[in-house]
Amino acid sequence: MEGLELLIPARDQHAYGVQRDYFDHANCIGWTREGDDAHTGCAVVISNGEEGNKHMEIGKRYAGKRFKDILGKREEEIEVDEEGWADFLCAAGSVSVWTLAE
């Protein structure tokens, strides 16, 4: 599977803390992991159809922070609002894993 070499370490480094699921669409789903004291969180969006996006909560601790797609499917960075929410994107028929931009 393309990108598997990036997905495994991403899960190891970012899949901690509160998880929020967004399974409200038949062809585009997402979830966030808020992280914990030792790990930053992540947001994941998967689409098996058209380009997709999910308005998801990642946590207030990320207010004003920018996230990037570590799989490189999306070039833009996404900024988290003051309430800890952002619109996370993915390309058509793809997956994007969003982590803090360095």
Image: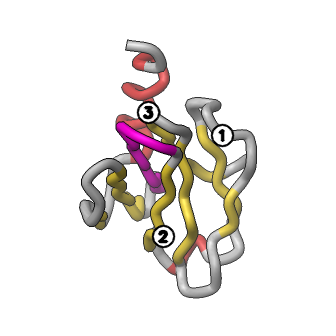
Q: Residues within 10 Å of mark 3 (few under 14, many from 20)?
A: some
**Where on the picture, by quarter, is residue 48?**
top left
Residue of label 2 = 55
Residue occupying image coordinates x 48% and y 70%: 55
Q: Measuring from the top left, give residue 100's x and y in whole percent.
A: 62, 52
**Where on the picture, by quarter, is residue 13?**
top left
| SS label for mark 3 | loop
Q: Please, which residue is most extreme toward the bottom here?
A: 83
Using the image, tell me which numbered label, if any, was put on residue 93.
Answer: 3
Q: Measuring from the top left, give residue 46's x and y in whole percent.
A: 39, 43
Task: Work out how far the residue at label 1 is from the one at label 3, CA to CA, in angstroms.
Answer: 13 Å
Q: Which range is magenta? A: 41-50
Q: Residues within 10 Å of mark 1 (few under 14, many from 20)?
A: some
Using the image, tell me which numbered label, if any, was put on residue 74.
Answer: 1
Q: Amino acid at mark 1?
A: Arg
Q: Residues within 10 Å of mark 2 (few under 14, many from 20)?
A: few
Compare marks 1 and 3 and give the one earlier in the sequence: 1
Residue occupying image coordinates x 29% and y 60%: 25
Which of discs 1 and 3 lies nearer the camera? The answer is: 3
Q: Is residue 68 magenta?
A: no
